[in-house]
Image (cartoon, rainbow, N blue to C red):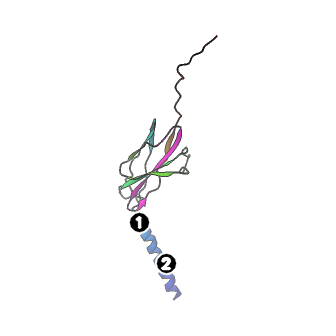
């Protein structure tokens, strides 16, 4: 009886692994490179859509999530405090018009398909400096 129970548990474990691999097959591998170009009050993000799943098979994302943190991008890993600023967008670009100067911003993107959300892309970001003040006008001196 013990042998049958052990064999049954081993077969059940293999079935669970096979099932997990089947679902993992659809997960998207993100090979995106995010580029950020900042104007006075916006950041334009662009990336290359992934074309393969984690198992190497061809797949196409159904959308993307965009995340932003208000810190400098770390040398490796993801920034702390990032929040999702766009959900399930269809294009491989996004313009963030909610940034302000002075400010530091770090972005990353994930791809979506029927298996869920992919791992994060690389990070990219930059800083907006406080605009320089205009010179004072109508300055005068009266000497008596």
The single residue placed furthest to the bottom in the displayed view is: 1
For disc 1, the marked residue is 23
**In screen coordinates, is 17 left or right of 81?**
left
**x then y, percent, for residue 16:** 45, 73
**In screen coordinates, is 109 left or right of 77?**
left
Instruction: Say what secondary structure mark 1 lies in.
Output: helix
Taking depth in this image into account, of 85 and 61 the one nearest to the observer is 85
**In screen coordinates, is 63 left or right of 7?**
left
Which residue is at a point 56% across and 18% down the rendered structure image? 139
Taking depth in this image into account, of 100 and 32 the one nearest to the observer is 100
Please state which of the two labelled residues, at mark 1 or mark 2, is closer to the viewer. Answer: 1
**x then y, percent, for residue 143:** 63, 12
C-alpha gap between disc 1 and disc 2: 20 Å
Q: Which mark, residue 10?
A: 2
Up the image or down, 14 lies above or below 96; here it is below
Q: Is residue 134 found inside the magenta-colored segment of the image?
A: no
Q: Which residues are magenta?
A: 98-121
The single residue placed furthest to the right in the displayed view is: 144
Quadrant position of the C terminus in the picture:
top right
- Asked whether the residues under the numbered discs 1 and 2 touch, taking CB atoms below 8 Å apart as contact, a structural biologist would say no
**In screen coordinates, is 22 left or right of 104?**
left
**Of the residues under marks 1 and 2, which one precedes in the sequence?**
2
């Amino acid at each position: 009886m013990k042998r049958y129970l052990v064999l049954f548990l081993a077969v059940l474990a293999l079935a669970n692994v096979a099932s997990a691999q089947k679902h993992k097959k659809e997960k998207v591998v993100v090979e995106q490179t995010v580029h950020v170009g900042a104007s006075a009050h916006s950041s334009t993000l662009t990336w290359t859509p992934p074309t393969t799943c984690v198992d190497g098979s061809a797949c196409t994302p159904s959308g993307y999530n965009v995340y932003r943190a208000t810190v400098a991008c770390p040398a490796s890993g993801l920034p702390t405090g990032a929040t999702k600023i766009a959900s399930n967008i269809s294009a491989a670009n996004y313009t963030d018009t909610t940034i302000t100067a002075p400010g530091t911003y770090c972005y990353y993107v994930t791809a979506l398909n029927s298996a869920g959300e992919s791992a994060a892309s690389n990070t990219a970001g930059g800083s907006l400096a406080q605009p320089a003040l205009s010179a004072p006008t109508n300055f005068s001196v009266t000497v008596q």
